[in-house]
Image (tube, rainbow, N blue to C red):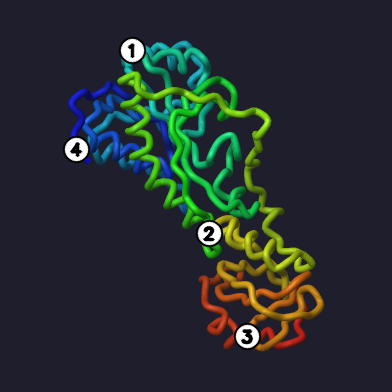
Amino acid sequence: MEKTNTPLRVAFMGSPDFAVPTLEALLERGHQVVCVYSQPPKPAGRGGKLRKTPVHEAAEAAGVEVRTPRSLKTPEALADFQALDLDAAVVAAYGLILPQSILDAPKLGCLNVHASLLPRWRGAAPIHRAVLAGDAKSGVTIMQMVAALDAGPMLLTEEVVITPHMTSADLHDRLAELGGPALICALEGVAAGTVTPVEQDESQVTYAAKLAKEEAALDWAKSTEELDRQIRAFTPWPGATFTVKDEVVKVLDAAPAPGNGQPGEVLDDALLVACGTGALRLKKLQRPGKKAMAAEDLLRGWPLPRGTRLG
């Protein structure tokens, strides 16, 4: 990506892997990222050692100052932010609510990289919900932020086809790649006055609620298509599950296949499982406390023969 001739003074606000390519795009383009805001380090692993967010680590590697306030609603946080004298702030999966005083501080406002084609899937889990619902497409929306959740006017969208085998992890990575170039285009368009904001159609709004582990349990009475989407939507987290032999087993890969039987019935010795309509071939699984493995490897030491009923 070529350097810009008119670098902007920008703060970047993000935390997870999804946001890193957008930060990198800003830096590569030559904009002046004066500060990065990210979630505070959190205990991780068995030892509980504090772990920085992926954005925090990427910013430090690039020599950019990192701030990790627990809130942006204090007078001190606002004063520190205003003192940056920003042209714009860029937000991508940050994890903190930005009060109106923060949104108003940069000259060009705050731009958000959102992982859906707004107004569909406002909220916490737009990628997973798009896969789970069987949407034909997803994408990224660059919007001008307002106080209401994901409700600001849209500056630019980039679409992606959701293919039949695409998991949430696959879609996440594709949208993360798109976020950086889309943000650069929108940001520079706003600065040049060449981008026209488009208000969202409130009649088309849907909300992407945060995932709950309880949603991961497979109901074999559902159709093959529904269960296939559930498995792909919940890969890699939290992992769609079934119960058998008093164990909760994760399904990490499966494929629709011909077959008929009672829902949850294993139809052959290679884990073809009957659904409400059709069947699913389970291809990759993970038992509690064990590594993920292909179905044929799992079955060698833990047979689930024809006639086994899965819960």
Closer to us: mark 4 or mark 2?
4
The residue pinned by badge 1 equals 83
Q: Name the image quarter holding residue 179.
A: top left
The residue pinned by badge 3 equals 270
Callout 4 secondary element: loop
Mark identifier at residue 167: 2
Q: Is residue 218 left or right of residue 129?
A: right
What is the C-alpha distance between the residues marked 1 and 4?
Answer: 29 Å
Closer to us: mark 1 or mark 4?
4
Callout 1 secondary element: loop
For badge 2, the amino acid type reads Thr
Which residue is painted at 47% across and 57% down in the image? 170
Sequence-earlier tag: 1 or 2: 1
Badges 3 and 1: C-beta atoms under 8 Å apart? no
Which residue is painted at 41% across and 46% down in the image? 176
Which residue is painted at 61% across and 75% down in the image? 282
The residue pinned by badge 4 equals 2
